[in-house]
Image (spheres, helix red, strand yellow):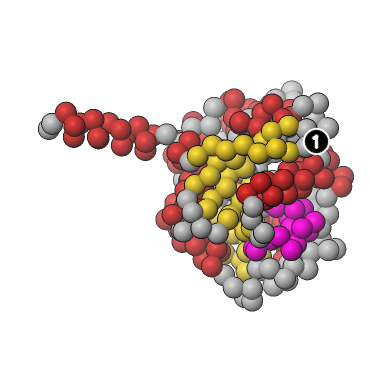
Amino acid sequence: MSWPALLCMALLGLLAAAPASARCALRHFPAEGGTLAYRSCGHGPTVVILPGGPGLDASYMGDIAEAVAADGRRAILLEQRGTGESRAAIGDGSRLTVAGSVADVEALRRALGAERIAVIGHSFGGAIAQAFAAAHPDHVERLILMDSVGPDLHPTPAPFDSWRKRLDIKQLAAYDAARARGDRLAAMRLKFLGSFHHRDRGIAFLKAMPDAAFHQDVAPLSDDYARHYDVSATARPLFPVIILAGDEDWIRGYEPALRAAYPKAVTILIPHAGHFPWADAPAATRRALHSALVRGPHP
């Protein structure tokens, strides 16, 4: 094989190995109290993607950004305050609130020059997405809640412990010990391990998330949401709402509350998938995401 061909193969291999978000253009925009960053992929109608955690670097959702871009849209993957390239904007932590989160997304929308945006919120990012949609409904084209928390963070009738059944005895003991000593990082990693249908894919997914991608000092954001976030009484949107989830995801305990808040919402389940369905079932997730992006206003 010729040197040019070998070089081409090597470059393709490096590209495939790189996180998908790293293959998107990095941009910055001004927000209250600092500068935030986002990754931009593709061209077309704007879709803003909000990662979860809170406190996870956005890179874990890079494949979702690329799937959205491949579907003929401009995917905007927000690196939320205190994470990734927006790390410095955490400041003294005073902006880690419901109001601060909504203001950050609105600052991003303005910086993009988009009158209306589709919003995808994954896990805790779904809370930010719902809070933004409730505050700025005229600027939302559609709301896609991907393995999302509910319209509030109140306890639900269904327990959120199905992930424990996927861990062995030693792993469960390690999780409980981590929680007891306040080691949120170790506990989160073990909980995530129990959040996949395919264990081997889950292990590979988590290996690609270094410890530096978890920012524990952003965790207080969830405390403010627990106290001040509740859109269930005001959530009567005129835009399409799509509930998208892995069929085995423990967070589906929030679905009854989501359906009550959004009675016209369409629910799309991805078979044989957990909390990160694009890792468990990539092709099925891409199909479900396409369906969510093209759904009309009426189910």
- Location of the N terminus by quadrant is top left
Residue corresponding to mark 1: 95
Spot occupied by residue 192 in the image (x, y as percentages of width and height) = 59, 39
Q: Amino acid at mark 1?
A: Arg
Q: Is residue 15 left or right of residue 50?
A: left
- Considering every residue shown, the one lying at the far left of the view is 1
Range shown magenta: 125-142
Q: Is residue 131 visible?
A: yes
Q: Is residue 140 magenta?
A: yes
Up-down relation of residue 253 to residue 221 (above or below)? below
Relative depth, front residue between 65 and 46:
46
Find numbered disc 1 in the image and state the secondary structure of the residue it sits on: loop
Q: Residue furthest right?
A: 227
Locate residue 103: give its quadrant. top right
Which residue is at 59% across, 40% downward? Answer: 38
Measured as percent of width and height from the top left, residue 246 is found at 56, 55
Residue 196 place in picture, x, y as percent: 53, 45
Q: In the displayed structure, does residue 289 sit left or right of residue 54? A: left
| Label 1 CA crowd tier, 10 Å (few <14, some 14–19, many 20+) | some
Residue 154 highlighted magenta (yes or no): no
- Residue at horizontal 53 percent and vertical 32 percent from the top: 209
For the residue pair 207 and 10, the one nearer the viewer reads as: 10
In the rendered structure, the answer to whether residue 234 lies left or right of residue 126 reads right
Q: Residue at x 64, y 76 (%)?
A: 298
Which residue is depicted at the point 37% across and 36% down? 15
Q: Is residue 24 above or below residue 157?
A: above
Q: For residue 222, which quarter of the picture?
A: top right
Residue 200 in which image quadrant: top left
Percent across and percent down for residue 219 are 74, 33
Magenta-highlighted stretch: main secondary structure? helix
Of the pair 159 and 9, the residue shown nearer to us: 9
